[in-house]
Image (cartoon, coloured by chain):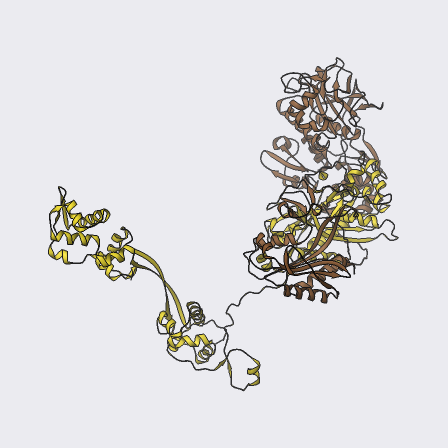
Amino acid sequence: MASVRFPRKEFEKQIKITEDIKERINMFGTHIKSLTDSEIEVEILPNRPDLLSMQGFIRAISAFIGKQTGLKEYKVIPSGEKLIVQKPLPQTWVYAYACIVKGIKFDDEKIKEIIQIQEKLVATLLRNRKKGGIGLYPLDKITFPIAFKGMKPDEIRFRPLEYPEPITGRQIISKHPKGREYAYLVEHWNVFPVFIDKKGVIMSMSPIINSHDVGKIDENTKNVFIECTGTDSLTIQKALIILVTTLAEMGGEIYSIECIQQNGERTQFPNLAPEKRRVSIEKVNALLGLSLKDKDLEELLPRMEYKYKKGEVSVPAWRTDILDTVDIIEDIAIAYGYENITPILSSVDTVGEESEDSLIKNKISETLIGLGLLEISSYHIIKNKEAEPLEEEDKVCIQNSKTDYKFLRPNLLIPALRILKENKDNEYPQRIFEIGPVFAFDKNSQTGVKESENLIIVATPASFTEMKQILEYLMRTLDLVYKLRESSNKLLIEGRTATIMFKDQEIGYFGEMHPETLCSQGLKMPCAIIEISLESLMKR
Amino acid sequence: MSSTQKSNKSSNLPDSDVGKVLDSFSPLERKIIPFLNLPYEKIKEKTELDDVSLLRTLRFLENKGVVKIELQHTTIVDLGTNGIYYKKNYLPERTLILALEEQSYISLEEAQKNSKLSDNEFRVSLGVLKGKALINLSNGKINLTASKEELTKKSFEEQLIDILPKNLNSLPPELLHAVENLKKRKEIIEFRKDRKTLILLTPLGKSLAGQKINIDLIEEVTPEVIKDWTRGKKFRRYDIHAPVPKIYGGKKHFVNQSIERAKRIWLNLGFKEMSGPLIETSFWVFDALFTPQDHPAREMQDTFFIKDVKGNLPAGDIVKRVKQAHESGISGSKGWRYSWKEEEAKKVVMRTHTTCLSARTLASLKNAKNKTGKYFSVGKCFRNETLDWSHGFEFNQTEGIVVYENGNFRNLLGYLKEFFTKMGFSNIKFVPSFFAYTEPSVEVYGYHKGRGKWIEIGGAGIFRPEVVIPLLGEYIPVLAWGPGFDRIIMDKYEITDLREMYENDIKKLRDKKVWVK
């Protein structure tokens, strides 16, 4: 989700923001985050990068509200110039497209605006330069044909933007601020991609930085050369098409360039010819649950910037999200108005059923609540400090946690002790239980981590006898036969600890907590616990 | 008169009500009543009760309109350490006077020597006597100017010391003045706060006080009482309004109660519960849901990845089909057009939504004869977040899918409206949205009556063909939703800090109301 701000005065030169328009903008899917006297802020969904500029946004909304419907056409004049993509180029960064826009009045405001649109497109569509980069250059500073190719980092030498002197490609990624910021994207490449013009002037190093000499737009610039390079041909073309149509909305004239890719593919770029798709009205009605007629589509689709005629939809070139017919069907629903679609339950008969695991866990819960125990619900992750006493093989660690909680809990005892400590000042007796998953490494599980349900019961103050009574009551009520075996546990008192056996398997333990353990936890009341693995009990 | 009438201010009660009051006296109350006309200390003495029991019983009598208890806070002035000494050995200014009476008009050094006072005492005495105009100082000599009469009279300070300890309120103005003077001097007097219990008798109390109450009332019903029961025996009446100690029972955790509530709604609509692990491979959490491998949600700052483990991908050609959907699309879609990597899909994460359960369910239906079904889940999900009043790394989500060849967008909105209306929202609104795996997509807003505004509840949509076809084998409309749940819980229980959801404060858990409707 990206948030964009448009100056209200500029916006209202084209569309006045009334209460009705506000509602329309919201029902278009672009939620108005804030509206002041000076600006309007809207949330743009990730699938509509064409709305990131005010021009693109107004173009879409104008169609939606019926002000200027249909597929907008932009004139493209062939410039006769060429862009040639050569070998070698790093790994997958092998595509480059470019074109020319003439006649834009570049003042301070406009330059800022265009840079912002460029940055937003790169941040979202081009995944923050991972997928591609965009560059703009004053047209009169470069000579055609332009080549896009990889050069060894030390052989590249030019003065990068806002830098005092020429430095090599290698130096750029260590000295220039933008170079340092994005070094991680390119440092492992053998060659760095550059744009070079006919005279051998290096125009930029993709996707890092333009040349200060030939790649800086200022108030004197009238015409621009714009390019986009990257790893996915379709995406970078779309990014550039969005930018170039935005510039056209600003008053620019589009001139196409012949772009020749590494694989020989030739494109007169930009090709703004709409993609044509067939849409069947039956499919639309089936998916939406409506009874639209062809003439309804003729009215609805143009409000989403499409051209429609007899089952054929023409999709604007700046739409990146139309992958399938369903994408067009969604736009039909938006134009129809979600608020106009009546909800109705489907008439399919099915029988409701709780999962077996849930049923069993609920019965256990019910039984313990019948004894007056209070259910608690703790985090599945435990703190760094709490995991310290564990063996290395029991510590399932989370990478990059932003908090102190770093390990998956191996048992329910650790969170239970934390909760007892935090409830020191509340009325006693405290009798609590929890049912929940615990985690351990397991090579045989599909994820390498085994999850199993455990049950813990903690009572304080309490004795061995009381815990045994609770255990006995629980097992009796669930009709489960179990055996006990004397055992030791370093947290519990020797001679007051028992292992619980079910079908010859150890499923848990219970006993009185040792004063040493209580002291180390800062607890002052005697305490007894039961922890059982429910896995084999549930299988029964 | 009704017996439930409160008798805090009882005036002339008719006999039947007096009778009821008499019948309601506990053994302790009956013990005290004979001495009620005496002051508190005397009652304590006579009944041999400790302060706690006596006060508690008096309060019960207060509730029955027999007495009114007033606590009087007073300050007591008493002698300090030096005060006790000076009481026995005269205040230093008196010692000086006595020395001066022997020899008037002498030097300061001689006067101090004769009086045997310390430097400090001597200095203070000079000040006091000069202030009372009893001496004269000139040229380093003292002159006793007081008359014989003045000297024999005790000063107010001396009078005060004689009568301490005394209640500050009981002192006349001239002695209060003496208090102020002595206060400034070292440890001669000290102050104590005292609390006195005053018992005021109401008219009812007046009529009862001093009397012995000889009613034989039964306290506890025992097997003996039952065995020896004869007509005419009376039971001591209880004050039904008297508070009783609070007790606590067992309860489901309020989050689990809310989850049960949501479950019930889905079960009643004919949905079957899905279950699955919290730790999943990226394949099921992302790839099977057509989320490209370079999507921001798959980065470490948003998702918890488990260290040192590698997952396994499911057997069969489901992996191949998912790979194809990503790389080149299926049935008319263009896909994401990148190179799909198995290694990325094998990464193990804590599930960021319960939609992976829906993916698994669809995959399990691939070879089913009848694929129609409605499935739901309510479960825990995780996000790599900080922990503060509005952020948390664990949250609950409710998930649902309807697999039905005639399913459509209106039905989707229908299920959403049904569920959220039952969860307490009076009005539901649908707005266009975007999710990588649904199209069309919708964001649900509910009108919150209490806050008087629309709030975002959750997202839903119809699964994209790129999701359904690799998993199910064919395209059947799958209506799907996965709204978060915690917002609704926090609202119902009026929690404003997200951390309270899992803080497990036993007092709060004990006091939490049960969600009935």
> Where is A481 relative to B220, above or below?
above
Quarter of the figure with the N terminus of chain A? top right
Instruction: Residue at 82% x, 51% y: name it.
Output: B404
Q: In the picture provided, is A459 more to the left or to the right than B76?
A: right
- The quarter of the displayed image where residue A326 is located: top right
Q: In the picture provided, is A241 more to the left or to the right than A495?
A: right
Front-most of B41 and A129?
B41
- The quarter of the displayed image where residue B13 is located: bottom left
Quarter of the figure with the C terminus of chain A? bottom right
Q: Give the x, y percent position of residue B370.
A: 87, 53
> Where is A191 relative to B293, above or below?
above
Chain A in the picture: what colour?
A: brown
Most extreme residue toward the top is A199
Front-most of A191 and A19?
A191
Front-most of A409 and A269?
A409
Q: In the picture provided, is B211 more to the left or to the right than B117?
A: right
Front-most of B470 and A380?
A380
Asked whether residue B449 appears in the rendered view, the answer is: no
Asked whether residue A31 appears in the rendered view, the answer is: yes
Q: Give the x, y percent position of residue B197.
A: 37, 66
Chain B in the picture: what colour?
A: yellow
- The quarter of the displayed image where residue A187 is located: top right
Most extreme residue toward the bottom is B230
> Where is A127 relative to B392, above or below?
above
Q: Give the x, y percent position of residue A328.
A: 79, 39
> Where is B512 relative to B62, above or below?
above
